[in-house]
Amino acid sequence: MKSNFKSGFVSIVGKPNVGKSTFLNQVIGSKIAITSPKPQTTRNRILGIKTTEDYQIVFVDTPGIHKPKHQLGRILDETAYSSIQGMDAVLFMVDQAKGFGEDQIIRLFKDIDSPVYLIINKIDELKSKAEIDKIIMSYLGAFPFKGFFPISAKENLNIDKLITALQEDLQEGYPLFGTDEITNQTDFQIMAEIIREKVLYKTQEEVPHAVAVVIEHTEMVDETYEVHATIVVERSTQKQILIGKGGQMLKEIGTEARKEINKILDTKIHLVLWVKVKKDWRNRPSDLKAFGYDKSE
Ligand SMILES: Nc1nc2c(ncn2[C@@H]2O[C@H](COP(=O)(O)OP(=O)(O)OP(=O)(O)O)[C@@H](O)[C@H]2O)c(=O)[nH]1
Ligand SMILES: [Mg+2]
């Protein structure tokens, strides 16, 4: 480690679906946060730790800020808001010109001292530089951003330039986490999230949002890690959808989740899935806490 080693926290905030978690995975070079085309995919603060010879940046991925309809939504927004405070830099990620939802986020930047960068993501989908400029222009008067970075989290465009700029905002000192650590998430959390991701891809409308996944217990059986997980939903109709005709849907979710968990955690697992109904859990503090959505998290 060099004597002028630098480290710091950088949070990624913005509306749902703009690509915050895709960015985190790209920067770390490993899938630590689940992603999906549906809004409100991320539900917890997820750390992605990038360490080199010269620096350690702890990226903080946050839930997309939205208009909450449940207590869960309010917890998600609070989780994101609290991740704006006390950072060495904040990345405000957008994927289109300024709209209504963003003013309430930008307002929060006025109360903090850390630099805020405007990150225009998904430029692989834009046809010309003029389109990028148009997006930047729409935010220019809203806040004195320290810099603007048009990037593609998916195609890894321009991210290196952003990382170089961020090094200026870090503090000289020791690494904040072990130099071989890449996330704060436990294997249980990663397993539960991968299962939830498969549900997000396979279900529509309210179902994906009404799902929580809990790892009940695990045991070693003949050199295979047996993992028992429960998918919690709010209604019996949602349970029927998740189980599917003759159990087909649950089987597909299980197979896809197992394959990905095997790959990510590099362990052979056997996944046993159950579906359980917990009425209105997204509004019940005890359920929210039990499923890992705690305000203090
Ligand atoms: N074309 C394109 N799509 C992207 C890019 N980055 C993310 N996406 C897609 O945008 C969708 C949302 O990505 P996520 O990373 O889950 O977005 P998020 O901001 O974390 O969403 P929440 O967790 O709901 O707040 C997914 O379908 C991604 O594949 C990009 O650079 N280009
Ligand atoms: Mg996300």
Image (tube, rainbow, N blue to C red):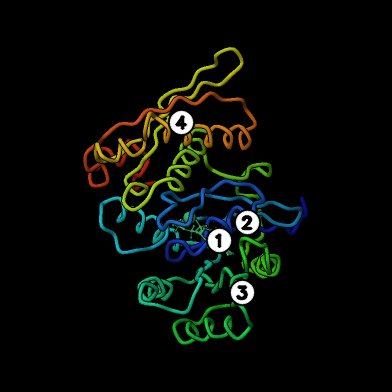
Circle nearer the N terminus (3, 1): 1
Circle nearer the N terminus (3, 4): 3
- Residue type marked 1: Val
- Residue type marked 2: Ile
Compute the Cα span from label 4 to label 2. Answer: 39 Å
Compute the Cα span from label 2 to label 1. Answer: 7 Å
Residue 46, percent from left and from top: 50, 49
Which residue: 43% across, 32% down? 248
Secondary structure, mark 1, is strand
Secondary structure, mark 3, is strand
Q: What residue is disc 1 on?
A: 10
Circle nearer the N terminus (4, 2): 2
- Callout 1: few (<14), some (14-19), or many (20+) C-alpha neighbours within 10 Å? many
Secondary structure, mark 4, is helix
Whether the residues at callouts 2 and 1 have beta carbons within 8 Å, the answer is: yes
Q: On screen, 228 above or below 99?
A: above
Circle nearer the N terminus (2, 3): 2
Viewer-closest of 127 and 244: 244
Q: What residue is disc 4 on?
A: 251
Q: On screen, 146 above or below 264?
A: below
